[in-house]
Image: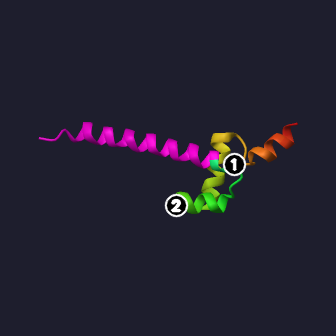
């Protein structure tokens, strides 16, 4: 018999890990100069969600070049 509680907890943990990795990839793509619309299309989310993820992960929404220029 399946222990549904354990199985669903495991699946939730895997999904959380995958979502965290996706968010880190989204933030890295932005740092590398990709647009929010590009990133959103690639990740299957809208561009505003991509922007919010970048803000949360990177602490800003700029590209690496913009960030370095603005903080120099």
Q: Nearer the viewer, residue 53 or 67?
A: 67
Specify the quadrant that holds the N terminus.
top left
| Quarter of the rendering occupied by the C terminus | top right
Where disc 2 sits, the SS reads loop
Q: Position of residue 9 (x, y in %)?
A: 32, 38
Q: Given contact means CB atoms under 8 Å apart, are the residues at marks 1 and 2 in contact? A: no
- Mark 2 residue crowding within 10 angstroms, few (<14) / some (14–19) / many (20+): few
Q: Which mark is on residue 44?
A: 2
Rendering coords of residue 36 (x, y %): 66, 58
Residue 57: assigned label: none
Q: Which residues are magenta?
A: 1-28
Q: Secondary structure at mark 1?
A: loop
* Residue 50 falls in image quadrant: bottom right
Residue at the (51%, 42%) spot, across then down: 21
Choose top left, top right, bottom left or bottom right for residue 59.
top right
The question of residue 35 being in magenta is answered with no
Q: Is residue 22 magenta?
A: yes
Question: In this figure, which residue is indicated by the disc labeled 1?
Answer: 32
Residue 21 vertical placement versus 48 (above, below): above
Number of numbered discs visible in the structure rendering: 2
Sooner in the amino-acid sequence: mark 1 or mark 2: 1
User: Left of 44 or right of it: where is 31?
Assistant: right
């Amino acid at each position: 018999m399946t222990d549904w509680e354990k199985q669903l907890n495991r699946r939730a943990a895997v999904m959380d890990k995958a979502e965290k990795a996706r968010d880190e990839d989204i933030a890295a793509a932005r740092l590398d100069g990709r647009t929010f619309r590009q990133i959103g299309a690639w990740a299957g989310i809208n561009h505003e969600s991509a922007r919010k993820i970048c803000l949360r992960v990177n602490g800003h929404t700029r590209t690496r070049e913009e960030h370095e220029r603005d903080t120099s």
